[in-house]
Image (cartoon, grey):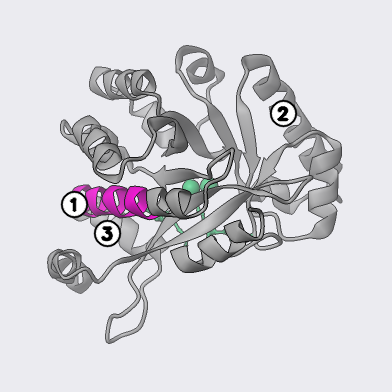
Amino acid sequence: HDLKAQMDGAIARGEFALCYQPVVDIAAGDVVGFEALARWPHLPTGPVPPGQFIPLAEESGHISMLGAWVLHRATADIARLQRRIPLPAPPYLSVNVSARQWGDMSFLDEVCTALDAAGLVPGTLQLELTESVLMQRTDQIDEVIRELKEVGVRIAIDDFGTGYASLRYLRDFPIDVLKIDKTFIDGIPQDSQQVALVEAILRLADTLGLQVIAEGIEEQEQRELLADIGCRFGQGYLFARPMTVEEGELVLRQRA
Ligand code: G
Ligand code: G
Ligand code: MN
Ligand code: NA
């Protein structure tokens, strides 16, 4: 594929970019964190969406190099933001990590190096994995996750509810956060079955001591219902689209 051939050079030349989508306290509206999202904006043929280049990078193996760049860049950005705007509860950083990266021998080291280099407290880093990673678990992946937890990094399941969900991994795995997939949020408040499902997920999370983030909140009615049923955190266009780190700083200043 042509895009694959261009990826090496693009990573080396710094042609990828990161934007950040705020995670908010649904009831209060305060920004509590940012999810880093990769962008490839300046190709002659126009921007390539991550839904396209991330799977390509996974296939070709470029995801290891790209993922390392994302980690370093995002931890540096958020550490700088935390220093510039001191808050009693500094905003956390959430980073998407592909299955292939979880299996990389060097991944644990890379995370620690990025945290050190940026001067970011491990507790303000959250790593997102998908249910497919849990399905392909190996001893090595388990070990990496255990060690990351020991360092203090938080682990979130992304797109929760869309994969081959097994409740067993919630029991056996040191997970901190469930991110409820947008497809569950889309149907509320109209679809009573979807509402019931989200309520069930909230109860389960509560029982297991997990935090919940609702994804893809676009409507005020969704926000109100989620607040009513006790969903504390969310992301979505209703609150904020992915933005530059400079825009993120402005949003935080409104809170400071
Ligand atoms: O930003 P957007 O919603 O278009 O992202 C599309 C998909 O690409 C999402 O599934 C998101 O998790 C994934 N993605 C975005 N940035 C990264 C990244 O830095 N690493 C990985 N592994 N996936 C990413
Ligand atoms: O797979 P993951 O959850 O990491 O994907 C996040 C993607 O969802 C990002 O590309 C982001 O741009 C997108 N996104 C975030 N909020 C909304 C929203 O409210 N509506 C829609 N359609 N997409 C959203
Ligand atoms: Mn995500
Ligand atoms: Na998601």
In the picture, the quarter occupied by the N terminus is bottom left
Q: Looking at the image, is mark 1 or mark 3 nearer the viewer?
A: 1
Report the magenta residues as a range.
63-77
**Secondary-structure class at tag 1:** helix
Residue placed under numbered mark 3 in the picture: 56
Residue at image position (57%, 44%) is 87
- The label shown at residue 256 is none
- The label shown at residue 65 is 1
- The label shown at residue 202 is 2
**Disc 2, ligand 4: is the CB inside 8 Å?**
no
Residue in the foreground of this view, choosing between 46 and 34: 34
Q: Earlier in the sequence, mark 1 or mark 3?
A: 3
Q: Position of residue 247 (x, y in %)?
A: 52, 68
Residue type, numbered disc 2:
Leu
Residue type, numbered disc 1:
Met
Around disc 3, counting alpha carbons within 10 Å, would you say few (fewer than 14), some (14 to 19), or many (20 or more)? some
Please tell me whether residue 17 belongs to the stretch shown in magenta: no
Residue type, numbered disc 3:
Leu
Q: Position of residue 206 (x, y in %)?
A: 69, 21
**Secondary-structure class at tag 3:** helix
Q: Position of residue 173 (x, y in %)?
A: 45, 17
